[in-house]
Structure formats: C-alpha cells, structure tokens
Image: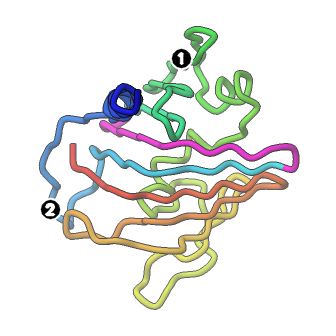
Amino acid sequence: MKKTLLLVLATLWLSACVSFPKGQWPSPNRPLVNYAVLGKVAIITPDKRDSANLYWQQQKQTFNLKLTSFLGTSVLSMEGEPGQVSLTNSEGTFKDTDAQYLLYQLTGWQLPVNDFPQWLKGQSGKRGMIVKKDSKGRIDTLQSEGWTIHYLRWTQAGGRDLPAMLDMSKDTIKIKLQINEWQPR
C-alpha cells in the first residue's frame, strides 16, 4: 500500500513539472525578451488566501502562464499574444482580448497580467513610476496602474540582476511572488 501511494504521489509530482525548452541567455547589454520563471505565488484578499506554483514563459510578445497546486494539479493555464488570450481551467477554455479582464471574470483575481512581464524583470514599463532604488541602482519600489511593487530580493542569472522576491499590492489585494528559477528561452 505504501509503495503504491508513493508511486502515485511521484507520478503526480512528475506530471506537474513543466518543461520548457532552454535557450541561451542574451548578453547582459541586450534586452531580455525570451525567458521563463518558475516559482510560487500567493494571492491574499480580505475574503481568501490562494497560493500556487507559478510557471511563466515569455517569448517576445507571447506569454504562457501555468498555475498548479502544491500537488501538481492544474489550477489554470493561460496563453496570450497581443489582442488574443485563452484561459483553461476545470470549467473549460475561454477566450478574450484582455488577459486581466478574462482572469478576473473567471477567478475573481485582479492580477496585473498585462504589466507583469516588465515588473517580473525588474523594469517599470511604460506606465510605471520608480519611487525608490536600492544601493545598486535596482528598483526597490515601483508604482504602476494603482499597484505598488516592492522588490525584496534579487538574484543573478544570465549575467544580470533579476528579481527573486516581490510583494505587490493594490487596494486590498496583496500578491507575494517568489521566483525560484530563471531560465533562458
């Protein structure tokens, strides 16, 4: 019985692992446009707390988001490119032109999907305002679209500093993001 249970758990864990084809890091003086991150996200509202494993892959203007439970069960997956996004969850596949709107309609989560690729890399984006920088010149605090983003920890990957831990908040929503691994695409 124990061996069967361990086998089932190992199978679930392995099936939860998302494999992205690896590429090469661009030189540090070139923009980072193709990458993937693996980590954990917690979404905290006055009504509830949700957490998931996060897999984000960015290929120029196209993104792929996967959220899984700690056991590896798919919570949702979302794919998008400019003007078109699809979200798949336990209820089916849904399409729209706005990622943030679609995610909110199906989950109730008001997540900054549209600005996320810039914030994820530690950049302000077009609408962001840098409030404070750290002693190394990296963003410490950023404000954008009503969100306040605090960069709590950084890591080195591909010869550049990249965020490893962020706290994001807007009104009564708090998002904690821990990035465990950066990968080139």
Query: Which quadrant: the C terminus?
Result: top left
Q: Residue at x 55, y 46 (%)?
A: 115
Considering only vertical position in the picture, is 122 above or below 71? Answer: below
> Secondary structure of the magenta portion, mostly?
strand
- Total marks shown come to 2
**Which residue matches tag 2?**
27
Measured as percent of width and height from the top left, residue 26 is found at 16, 55
Whether the magenta-drawn stretch holds residue 47 is answered as yes
Residue under numbered circle 1: 88
Query: In the drawing, does residue 168 fall left or right of residue 165?
Result: right
Between the residue at mark 1 and the residue at mark 2, the CA separation in whole angstroms equals: 35 Å
Q: Amino acid at mark 2?
A: Ser
What crowding class fits label 1: few (fewer than 14 Cα within 10 Å), some (14-19), or many (20 or more)? some
Residue range in magenta is 46-61
Sequence-first disc among 1 and 2: 2
Q: Position of residue 100 (x, y in %)?
A: 64, 33
